[in-house]
Image: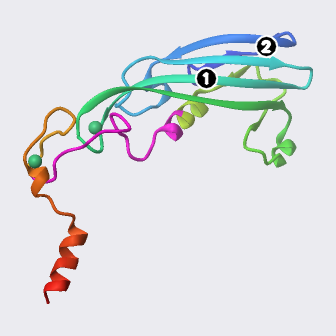
């Protein structure tokens, strides 16, 4: 069990709010994450099942893929899970958002789901901002903060090829 768990023994039917906190290490996030991971959970319990809505927040230090600057970014992920009490035979349930828990379980563990959903919302290319201008390919100047003179002389490599073709 991770530290991100919610006690469900004797949980009355109805809606319950829980706020959980863990360190990135406790959640199993990589070392880009440095601050506390916060999970706001809403549980809806009925006689037969438990419905969870989780809002997760983590803060990481990332390197921009375009300008190579370090920046801090809040990563927000939310997900839903339906917990159904049952035995192994109930595992035939195929929907991703359904998890089978033993009828005698007195807690649900959110740790692994929180880790997975946070990693899932991280884009492949992480940019400091959507409109990041990146580095000058010629001199390496960070175009977000300063300009250089290379720009005017730059030619599109595709035109370069065409020019050669026309010259031949
Ligand atoms: Zn950038
Ligand atoms: Zn330049």
Q: Main secondary structure of the magenta part?
A: loop
Mark 1 and mark 2: Cα distance apart in space:
22 Å
**Residue at position x 62%, y 16% from top?**
40
Tell whether position 131 is magenta. yes
Vertical order, 167 against 120 (above or below): below
**Residue at position x 19%, y 45% from top?**
135
Mark 2, residues whose alpha carbon is within 10 Å: few (<14), some, or many (≥20)?
few
Expressed as whole percent of the image width and height from the top left, the position of residue 132 reads 30, 39
Q: Is residue 139 left or right of residue 143?
A: left
Q: Is residue 108 left or right of residue 27?
A: right
Q: Is residue 83 left or right of residue 118?
A: right
Report the span colored magenta.
118-138
Vertical order, 87 against 71 (above or below): below
In depth, the one of 115 and 123 nearer the eye is 123
User: Residue 9 got which mark?
Assistant: 2
Circles 1 and 2, Cβ within 8 Å, touching? The answer is no
Quarter of the image for residue 69 reads top left
Q: Quadrant of ligand 1?
A: top left
Vertical order, 117 against 138 (above or below): above
Secondary structure of the residue carrying tag 1 is strand
Of labels 1 and 2, earlier in sequence is 2
**Residue at position x 7%, y 46% from top?**
149
In depth, the one of 38 and 24 nearer the eye is 38
> In what quadrant of the picture does the N terminus appear?
top right
> In what quadrant of the picture does the C terminus appear?
bottom left
User: Residue 22 got which mark?
Assistant: none
Mark 1, residues whose alpha carbon is within 10 Å: few (<14), some, or many (≥20)?
some
Q: Which residue is mark 1?
A: 55
């Amino acid at each position: 069990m991770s530290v991100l768990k919610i006690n469900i023994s004797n949980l009355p039917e109805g809606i319950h709010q829980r706020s959980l906190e863990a360190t990135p290490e406790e959640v199993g996030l990589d070392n880009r994450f440095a601050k506390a991971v916060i999970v706001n959970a809403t549980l809806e319990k009925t006689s037969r099942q438990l419905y969870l809505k989780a809002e997760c927040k983590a803060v990481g230090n990332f390197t921009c893929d375009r300008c190579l600057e370090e920046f801090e970014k809040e990563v927000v992920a939310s997900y839903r899970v339906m917990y159904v009490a049952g035995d192994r035979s109930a595992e035939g349930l195929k929907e991703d958002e359904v998890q089978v828990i033993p009828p005698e379980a007195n807690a649900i563990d959110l740790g692994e789901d929180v880790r997975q959903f946070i990693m899932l919302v991280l884009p492949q290319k992480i940019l400091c901002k959507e409109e990041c201008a990146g580095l000058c390919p010629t001199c390496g100047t960070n175009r977000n903060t300063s300009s250089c003179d290379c720009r005017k002389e730059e030619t599109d490599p595709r035109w370069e090829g065409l020019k050669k073709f026309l010259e031949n």
